[in-house]
Amino acid sequence: MLGKDGRGGWRRWVQRPQSLWVRKALAQIHLWIGIGVGIYVLLISVSGSAIVFRRELARYSRKSASVAQSGRRMSREELQKRVQSDFPSYEIYGVYDSERPERPVEVVLGDGKTRISRLFDPYTGRNLGDPQSFMSRTLGWLIDLHDNLLAGMTGRLVNGIGALFVTLLSLTGIIIWWPGIRHWRRAIVIHRKARFARFNWDLHSAAGFWCSAFVFVWGLSGICLCFPAVLNPVLSNDGVFWITQLHFGRFDRVTEAIWTILGLAPALLAITGALMWWNRVLRKRIAIRRSANSARITWLPARAHRTRRRAATAHADMFRHSDQQ
């Protein structure tokens, strides 16, 4: 794979890996996978970091509502009539009373396409709004985005394929990261005083090196979580449990904090990778195309001027010839 001469190929890999065809091939694979799934990686990275503390956030964002126990408590039929008058186009799917008299009643409604829940005062019939707070609804949206890409089981399937590509990105990335024995120290640090293109390169290289193991674990565990029907017969319940714990860092508060911060690394790699592609490929192509267009624009008037001058000369020669005759 490294050449006809195994020792020579290994020596080139250690000293000058950029000259090996296998590294060039892996770089192209890494580049085009990154371009294809860049936005996906950005969304999954940000949403994943946001929901690491979802249990704690859900606990503190619960909407607590209480009602004043005044007068007679409405019967279920009376409450349903009041609910139906507030939501005439919805059908009542269920009415759930609380065991505590000071708590409101939750009513679930639907119109065949959507389902909503509302709290009602059992004494006055007043609509108290959504039982979930804005934080709870936002958290639920982020969870659905991270798990299913907001598209149900189809989104879960696409998410599993995306996790496979993330795993490939981590593997190809750590291989092509190796810059050679003389420059490896420079590839793990960021030179803050460098120009922007160099700073962006250093940021991508250093972040990719230090976070490669985390990205690989997240990609591999994401595959397992998205395809449970395939992997559950192979994995035990303990195996599935530990994969979930590892995916979200659910060991203690410290690991959850680390997972939240490092969970943004894939988003950083996607952004810096896109900027590298812009600086090294797209901007140069645009500059070449612009220079070619400007040269064509400059060439066309000159050619037209020469054509007009030849025509004028031929016209004058024609009249001169006729005068001589």
Image (spheres, rainbow, N blue to C red):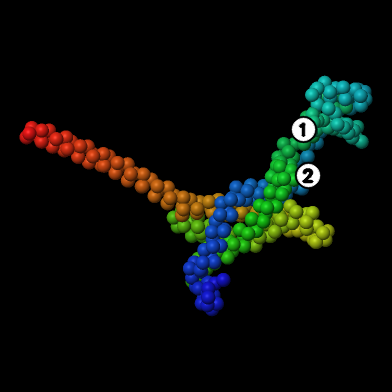
Q: Amino acid at mark 1?
A: Thr
The count of marks equals: 2
Q: Which mark is residue 42?
A: none
Badge 1: few (under 14), some or many (20 or more) residues near its Cα, within 10 Å?
few
Nearer to the camera, 91 or 199:
91
Q: CA distance from mark 1 to mark 2?
A: 26 Å
Residue located at (10% from left, 33% from top)? 322
Residue located at (78% from left, 39% from top)? 62
- Identify residue for label 1: 114
The mark that comes first in sequence, 1 or 2, is 2
Q: For the residue labelled by badge 2, is the local secondary structure a helix, a strand or a loop?
A: helix
Nearer to the camera, 53 or 240:
240
Nearer to the camera, 123 or 184:
184
In this rendering, position of residue 215 left or right of residue 117: left
Outermost left residue: 324
Residue 317, can we see it? yes
Residue located at (48% from left, 56% from top)? 199
The quarter of the image holding the N terminus is: bottom right
Q: Is residue 126 above or below residue 174?
A: above
Outermost top residue: 85
Q: Is residue 66 above or below residue 221?
A: above
In this rendering, position of residue 75 left or right of residue 309: right
Q: Is residue 125 above or below residue 101?
A: above
Q: For the residue labelled by badge 1, is the local secondary structure a helix, a strand or a loop?
A: loop
Residue located at (71% from left, 49% from top)? 157
Residue 102, can we see it? no
Locate residue 122, reporting x and y percent.
Answer: 88, 27
- Identify residue for label 2: 59
Q: Amino acid at mark 2?
A: Arg
- The quarter of the displayed image where residue 65 is located: top right
Locate residue 161, reporting x and y percent.
Answer: 68, 53
